[in-house]
Structures are given as C-alpha cells and as structure tokens.
Image: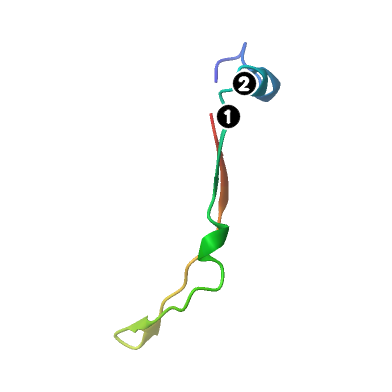
Amino acid sequence: MTTEQTLHSAAQDGRLYVADYAMLEGITLGSYKHWQKFITAPLALYY
C-alpha cells in the first residue's frame, strides 16, 4: 500500500482477500526422526 492507500479504501475497492486455514485445526500429525510435527491454522489478510 502506498501512503495514499488505507485498509478502508482497499476494502471499499474489493482488494482484500482472506485465507482461512481453520480446516487444519485438529488434524492428526505424525513425527519425523523422533520429533513431533506441529502445524498452525492461520487466518491471513492479503491486499
């Protein structure tokens, strides 16, 4: 965003995108070489 752009103007122009990875919450994970695997379920906002 430039100094003239704001989050509000991006929303009004339809230039905001949300990526919701909630489906990753609670999935079964394994291990690798005796180390436990972990994963997050982020919610990201892009413009």
Q: Nearer the viewer, residue 14 or 43?
A: 14
**Quadrant position of the N terminus in the picture:** top right
Q: Amino acid at mark 1?
A: Leu
Q: Is residue 30 above or below residue 21?
A: below
In which image quadrant can residue 36 be found? bottom left
The mark nearer the N terminus, 2 or 1, is 2
Q: Number of labelled discs?
A: 2
Q: Is residue 1 above or below residue 38?
A: above
* Furthest-right residue in this view: 8
**Residue at mark 2 to residue at mark 1: CA–CA distance:** 6 Å
Task: Classify 40 as above or below 26.
Answer: above
Q: Where's residue 11, x and y in %?
A: 65, 24
Mark 2 — residue? 10
Q: Residue at x 51, y 64 (%)?
A: 24
Q: Secondary structure at mark 1?
A: loop
Say which element carries label 2. helix
Q: Identify the residue shown where x is 29% and y is 85%.
A: 33
CB contact under 8 Å: marks 2 and 1: yes
Residue 8 is situated, as x and y percent measured from the top left of the image, at 70, 22
Q: Is residue 34 left or right of residue 44?
A: left
Residue 16 badge: 1
For mark 1, does the 10 Å Cα neighbourhood hold few (<14), some (14 to 19), or many (20 or more) residues?
some
Tell me the crowding category of disc 2: few under 14, some 14 to 19, or many 20 or more residues within 10 angstroms, Cα based. Answer: some
